[in-house]
Amino acid sequence: PRWATERCHVVCAPGHDSPPCQLAITMPGVAGLSRVTCLRGRWSDSTRTAHMACNASLFMGSPCRPRPAHRAAWKPRQCATRHRLEVTATASDVRETEKELRLMVDMQNVVSVVLGGGAGTRLYPLTRRRAKPAVPLAGSFRLIDVPMSNCFNSGISKIYVLTQFNSTSLNRHLARTYYMGSSFDRHNSFVEVLAAAQSDGIDGDWFQGTADAVRKYTWLLDSVKNKDIEDVLILSGDHLYRMDYRLFLQRHRQSDADITIACLPMDYSRASDFGLMKIDGEGRVIDFAEKPKGEELEGMKVDTTVLGLGEKEAEENPFIASMGIYCFRKEVLITLLRDRFPTANDFGSEVIPRSKDEYRIVAHLFQGYWEDIGTIRSFFDANIALCSRKPKFEFFDAKRPIYSSARFLPPSKIFECDIKSSIIAHGSYIGGGCKVTNSVVGIRSYLDQNCQLEEVLMMGSDYYESLSERDSMISENCPPLGVGKNTIIRTAILDKNSRIGRDCVIVNSAGVQECAREEQGFFIRSGILTVLKNATIADNTHI
């Protein structure tokens, strides 16, 4: 078989009357490994065949990682009693075993670095008072919860989060949600925030880009705490997707790569919007192009069947686009950032393209849902799409959940309302006569009687107001938290703790695409009207 870790049929030679209890395999040419002992398997008296599976950890983890040249270096096997054995593997055995063993990667020698320090200018005004990864998502989550949950679901428990701009709420959320506590082995499991900081010496400036942010903390990767780390996973904090990083790491290690890039199959209609890669017949990246057009775009076409696409899919998607998810060998990452490109600030446009001739860079094809929700339009559309019956991304997944802060809120109260294709988060109050269509209603939201919401992303509130407090504010002509009676809102985002009065109409009837009215409590970008965080919209306002 191609790998010792695949399940084999071990057939004893004639004259051997008892099944072997061990299978010893020699693998010449691999330093530090002379024999592999297999686990006891199932013996069949009728066929005199033992079904055994090897101990995959000897191959997948430290210290040995077989190189491609060694995969065929197998010699005749002998059992523990030195009787000769014939080893074969059927196609069905290989398929079944590959499915199981693809996930058998030692993740204890992997550390994840989540990039959460960007200014988030494309998501403004949602990033006006918070970091981009801290922006609320789907009524109950934050953007940072997606990569964090993917890490935990993939068995990665060593995570660094790099922060810089408006990081207060992000730091608070990470501390509340992902605090490991004293019951965990703090050496093998941790979530640590690495903030941008000024200090004496060459590392005294703020983060200048993704690569520069990681460079300023390469000393931490060299520390005793991370001495066993072999691979570093670089993740973005503003993408919506569900990915098993074990498959990604498996591709990285099996291909003997220095750098592995997660990529998406792409058709002609969207290819020019992404950074594209070109690969050879083995999946090695040989060229890069940033948002190419015309002849340059045609030159980036590749045979995506190399990465596992079927012929029809490959014909429809002749390009591969980078997802901004990278895996580096730790030594390679440190060498690139410190020695080879000490002034490069970005991974995608500088460090990785300049490394293609000197280092082995391979592509890993991801065929699930992925969306860059770094703009107001894409963020709004991705949230509203969650309301459909069969969304492309689904939070309802018991095996791979998306984690967030445990808030211990009560169930929502809903009185004689018309609610269609919507998400209602916990702790909300929806008064009688309300109509909510294709909308997301976030935690602690309050909708007074006869409100109408259509394609609205309402993020909710950080706290409650008592009934007496609400009545007192109404008597003083100050709108309480939430949406007042008889208000109509369409195609809008209501940021946290917004106060919208009675009898308002917020529909952007003029179809304005760009408008900054922050002093009035709202902002229009890409045609999406956003009521700012903590803003107040007075009674009878029409926008």
Image (cartoon, rainbow, N blue to C red):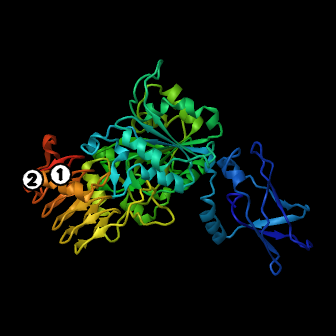
- How packed mark 1 is, by other alpha carbons closer than 10 Å (few <14, some 14-19, many 20 or more), is many
Q: Residue furthest top?
A: 201
Q: Tell me if label 1 and label 2 are in contact, CB under 8 Å.
A: yes
- As measured in the structure, the alpha-carbon distance from the residue carrying label 1 to the one carrying label 2 is 9 Å
* Kind of residue at disc 1: Leu
Q: Which residue is mark 2?
A: 543
Is 88 left or right of 79, judged from the image as shown? Answer: left
Q: Crowdedness of circle 2 by 10 Å Cα count: few (<14), some, many (20+)?
A: few
Q: Earlier in the sequence, mark 1 or mark 2?
A: 1
Label disc, if present, on residue 399 of the rendered structure: none
Q: Nearer the viewer, mark 1 or mark 2?
A: 2
Residue 464 position (above or below residue 514): below
Where residue 445 sits in the image (x, y, percent)? 27, 59
Residue 325 seen in the figure: no
Where is residue 397 drawn, in percent x and y?
46, 66
Q: Quadrant of residue 257?
A: top right
Q: Position of residue 80 (x, y in %)?
A: 88, 60
Residue pictured at 14% horizontal, 63% vertical = 485
Q: Amino acid at mark 2?
A: Ile
Say whether residue 143 is visible: yes
Q: Name the side, left or right, on which 70 lies relative to 291.
A: right
The residue positioned 20% from the left and 46% from the top of the image is 535
